[in-house]
Amino acid sequence: MSEVFRLDTAHTSYWFRVTGQGHLEHLYYGPTLPARQDPDALAVKRTAPIGTSTNYPGADPVYALDNMCLEWSGAGRGDYRETPIETDTATDFRYTGHEYAPAAPDGLPRPHGASQSLRVELADDAVGAALTLHYDVFYDADVIARHAVLSATGGPIQVAKLLSAMVDLPGGDWTLTTLNGAWVKEAHRQALPIGYGIQVNSSTTGSSSNRHNPGVMLAEPGATEEHGRVYGCNLVYSGNHYTAVERSGQDLIRVACGINPAGFGWTLAPGESLATPTVVLTFSDSGYGGASAHFHDFANDHIVPAYWARRPRPVVYNNWEATFFSFDAGKLLKLAKQAKALGAELFVLDDGWFGKRDDDTKGLGDYTVNPRKFPNGLGHFAAQVRKAGLDFGIWVEPEMANPDSDLYRAHPDWAITAPRREPTLGRNQLVLDLTRAEVRDYIVANVGAVIDETGAAYVKWDYNRNLADTDAPGFQHRYLLGLYDVLGRIFGPRPQVLLESCSSGGNRFDLGMLCYGPQIWASDDTDPVERLEIQGGLSLFYPQSTMGAHVSEAPHQQTLRDTPLTTRFNVAAFGDLGYELDLRMLSPVQRKEIKEQLAFYKEHRATFQYGRFRRVDTGMGAKPNKAVWTVSAPGEVIVGVFQTLATAAEGLDRLVVPGMDPATEYRLRTREQSVFLSRFGELIKHIGIRLNPEGMAMTAVNKVYRLTDAVEDYRVFGAALGNGVPLANQFMGTGYNDRVRMLGDFGSNLYLITPTAQTGSTS
Ligand code: DGJ
């Protein structure tokens, strides 16, 4: 009897087997199967030869690789679909054995805490190559992780392409969802029908990129956030990625994922091996939301460093948008003290503290503190911040050097350049060559010293340009291996330091970086309306705990959009909250509002950061100018209702809250928030204030007086919440009273839902 591999997670099964010819045939990926299921019934049938097929030598006449569901394939043996491997010859790997054992560490980031590990050995004797397919099962998270390792067992092998995994799924008219964007508009969700041929989601910038995130989802027709069959696939890698989705003429859908073959190339000397990054797969029959929930659990429990798994993340205050490069210790300390008074927990000193860095043309690569800005040194400043009651955090951009830096003057050869070409600059900087041991040692020593000297509890690791001038095949992968080595050496021995990675915002938002630091600055764009797209998109694959999300100034620095302070908080609260505006400019009522925001966030921090996140696509969430998010934890649910552009007579909103226990009674209550008088302009006459809206008296009143937005308070059973609870009317020009929800353009509310009795449940 042929070997059948049955991998089970809590709600899914993943089966494959060895065929009579030694190929691995994929049998099933879907809801959990009983072990006694007959595998033959699961296999794609081969009962009639399909014309123009190439038959496999020595096999029965219907054995054609092109018409089978496979776990791995090759080129040149009759499978004409996307191949996961390209060498200088045809390849045909066949089973030689297996063992239930994990892979040895190999310098690439890998998920931790697998419940089961399997390695399946294959060989192609004609090439002189062995291939190990690794499978790791994450039972509770419903995730299967895979990667491949290729070894040269005979002569040298030239590898042009080696993906991590491929799988063939029976499909048809499915939909492919990807996250696309650019700087300040990362992770916008796009869904396209999977047509015949190949669709590729990839990056070539040297990083996982803000253009195309590595995560993809495949969904059956009609799938919604809560219903339908959805597969998810993501790559634990921060460099050039590649996912090909091919629909064959027989409607099989192949998903093949790994390092982008563009620019890749590797020579394997006899006895050498090449390991590929981990691909993670999930399946849910509860829609996109179900697949996202699996990936969220997986990232929280098996990707982020064990020390930070489910650990509360501090509320930070970051000086960047408040000061840019123009600061000194005195100014920053004032901001730190104000941040502390509002409730912040950690002060982040952003760019500009070292060398001659008063703008972005100089200083990168140097680590000597700027004596004009910090006359008593950085350690002293960090101690003062701690004395003010905040932890200290610091910004670094260690992979870079400005040509105008002491480092570059001393070691011009440490920067990546191409022979006979003028080096390319991005944001006035060059990238350091992390394939070189001395460069890596310099970074490890200097960043380590800064952390130790300042006692930093947090590091923001920035990376503000893409790779270029990297001529040699495979160089960009070697760069990534260098980066992972550096990160491991700096943060491995300092697990308690909270690493937030950043790449001009979300230009490297991926599971690879999350293996070293548990959060990532999601975008330089902190406009809450844009963040609905960005955080909402990222939430397909990444949990809220991984997304740095800050309240900044309005009008917003990238969009000029003027949004209420309440909405800026209400969106940022669904992430790792921080503040980044100039606190010295706040009015007393704005201070009060922020204090209340922080108190609410801290009280519900575990729910915001680790609760089950849902994008609601029914009720109000189905309207084009609304977004509805919920987070739920035992004992409470928080709902965010966000309106983008108001339409006239925005009236009868119905709040649908999925996932509630139908038979439990809950209290649904709006979080109290302010409406500032400045929102009304000339309309203040409607609320009985007869002051010139532009006048000095009004300016003074606006600083100290605020209205409370409508607070609704209902008792409702879960069944009614699932069906939709009608909310109070929105402002529509027929008068203001304290039961009118003041949304307008960019308004929003948070609602807290708690069971009325101890027995209630939320999930
Ligand atoms: C880009 C980051 O995304 C910003 O938050 C800030 O840290 C700047 N770099 C500093 O140069």
Image (cartoon, helix red, strand yellow):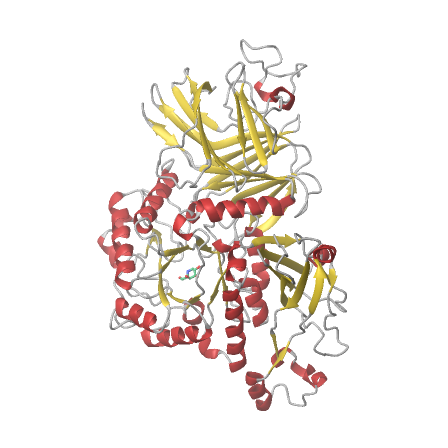
At x 28%, y 52%, the residue is: 443
At x 40%, y 32%, the residue is: 102
Q: Is residue 470 visible?
A: no
**Which of 507/430 is in front?**
507
Residue 366: x and y, percent?
Answer: 27, 59
Residue 80: x and y, percent?
Answer: 56, 23
- The image shows residue 749, relative to residue 624, as above or below, that is below
Location of ligand 1 given as a quarter of the image: bottom left
Which residue is outermost to the top? 58
- The image shows residue 204, relative to residue 94, as above or below, that is below
Which residue is outermost to the front? 758
- The image shows residue 222, relative to residue 676, as above or below, that is above
At x 51%, y 26%, the residue is: 72
Q: How many numbered marks have been drawn onto this rendered protein structure?
A: 0
Q: Quadrant of residue 397?
A: bottom left
Residue 574: x and y, percent?
Answer: 55, 60
| Side (left or right) of 727 relative to 748 | right
Q: Is residue 36 visible?
A: yes
- The quadrant of the picture occupied by the N terminus is top right
**Which of 394/674 is in front?**
674
| Side (left or right) of 686 relative to 610 | right
Residue 120: x and y, percent?
Answer: 45, 25
| Side (left or right) of 370 relative to 613 | left
